[in-house]
């Protein structure tokens, strides 16, 4: 067992994390010309196997982000997937982890520079947000407006987009909330900066439409499938008014990092009894069982890192 940090994959080389650096004069640093994916790896102790959840879908979305943001590289989705598996296997990872894969403009040119392109992957231990916090979060509706496809395309994971959410979260934290829900220019609900939003109202599970300026979330898509297949619930994708949040029986957020997190109150209005809802917690458990390989269904969503079960020389990093 080792307490050394995991090595970083930087432009095809595995290097100690302290040696992974890019120049401060790069377009990535100066103009936030960087796209990324947050991916989860789940360790299954019974099978002695590390499963990466929906790896090919994350690779596809990263490829889309690279294309939309005008970065010139020969790297594609197959390269992105293989790079993730390489860094995990090389580090002999045997625990739950978060994987951040980044593609960025490494050159020191102008704002419109398309290359050269850098590629990096960082792996960090992560047990899960919800397991280390309270029963859920208390959120507010932010005064900040969600970016739109006419300004910065929300459907891709570009680093610059996240300044919008950062401002909302800074304000929310200053006002005593855990999270912030952003509205679009039409006053309709979009998402929380770290995850998509679902609510249960009048017997329906509803979520904003992709065209309401939300991320094309892989976790959102996963939950829609699980609700249909395991709970016989067809999710309604539609515009959602702010006041519907106050009237909902359940509200929850989802994302790769968040997984599934209950919202207990919004603008000091308790969601129902102010406790995690039954559907929310059941869905959370179903999601984790699928991601961790404890559920035989949806095997095509999981990618095994090791050809055979890992031996006992597990690798743990602080």
Image (cartoon, helix red, strand yellow):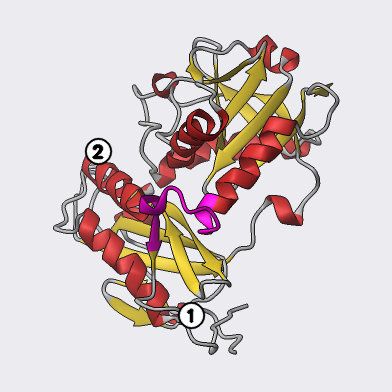
Q: Quadrant of the N terminus?
A: bottom right
- Residue 53 drawn at (x, y percent): 44, 55
- Residue 31 drawn at (x, y percent): 36, 48
- Residue 138 drawn at (x, y percent): 77, 34
Residue 182 in the figure: left or right of residue 171 = left
**Residue picked out by circle 2:** 68
Which numbered disc flags the more N-terminal residue, 2 or 1? 1
Residue 163 in the figure: left or right of residue 13 = right
Q: Quadrant of residue 26?
A: bottom left
Q: Which residues are magenta?
A: 290-303
Whether residue 259 is visible here, answered yes or no, is no
SS for callout 2: helix
Residue under the image location 71 percent in, 25 percent down: 250
Q: Quadrant of the C terminus?
A: bottom right
- Residue 301 drawn at (x, y percent): 39, 51
Given residues 241 and 200, the one toward you in this image is: 200
SS for callout 1: helix
Residue farthest to the right, as pictured: 273
The mark closer to the camera, 2 or 1, is 2
**Picture disc at residue 18:** 1
The answer to if 257 sits in the magenta stretch is no
Given residues 7 and 1, the one toward you in this image is: 1
Q: In the rendered image of this protein, does residue 247 appear above or below residue 123?
A: above
């Amino acid at each position: 067992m080792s307490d050394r940090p995991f090595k970083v994959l930087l432009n095809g080389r595995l290097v100690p994390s302290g040696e992974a650096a890019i120049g401060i004069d790069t377009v990535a640093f100066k103009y936030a010309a960087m796209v990324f994916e947050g991916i989860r790896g789940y360790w299954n102790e019974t099978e002695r196997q590390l499963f990466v959840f929906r790896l090919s879908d994350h690779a596809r979305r990263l490829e889309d982000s690279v294309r939309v943001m005008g970065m010139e590289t020969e790297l594609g989705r197959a390269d992105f997937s293989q790079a993730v598996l390489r860094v995990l296997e090389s580090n002999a990872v045997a625990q739950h982890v978060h994987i951040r894969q980044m593609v960025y403009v490494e050159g020191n040119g102008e704002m419109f520079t398309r290359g050269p392109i850098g590629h990096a992957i960082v792996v960090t231990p992560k047990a899960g947000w919800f397991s280390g916090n309270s029963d859920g979060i208390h959120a507010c509706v932010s005064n900040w407006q969600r970016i739109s496809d006419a300004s910065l395309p929300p459907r891709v994971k570009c680093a610059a987009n996240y300044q919008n959410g950062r401002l909302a979260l800074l304000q929310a934290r200053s006002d005593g909330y855990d999270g912030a829900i952003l509205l679009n220019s039409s006053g309709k609900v979009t998402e929380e900066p770290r995850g998509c939003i679902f609510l249960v109202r009048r017997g329906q599970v509803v979520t904003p439409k992709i065209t309401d300026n939300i991320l094309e979330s892989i976790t959102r898509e996963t939950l829609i499938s699980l609700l249909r297949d395991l709970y016989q619930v067809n999710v309604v994708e539609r515009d959602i008014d702010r006041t519907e949040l106050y009237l909902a029986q359940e509200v929850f957020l989802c994302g790769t990092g968040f997984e599934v997190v209950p919202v207990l109150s919004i603008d000091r209005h308790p969601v129902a009894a102010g406790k995690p809802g039954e559907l929310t917690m059941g869905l959370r458990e179903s999601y984790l069982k699928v991601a961790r390989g404890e559920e035989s269904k949806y095997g095509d969503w999981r990618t095994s890192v090791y050809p055979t079960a890992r031996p006992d020389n597990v690798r743990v990093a602080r």
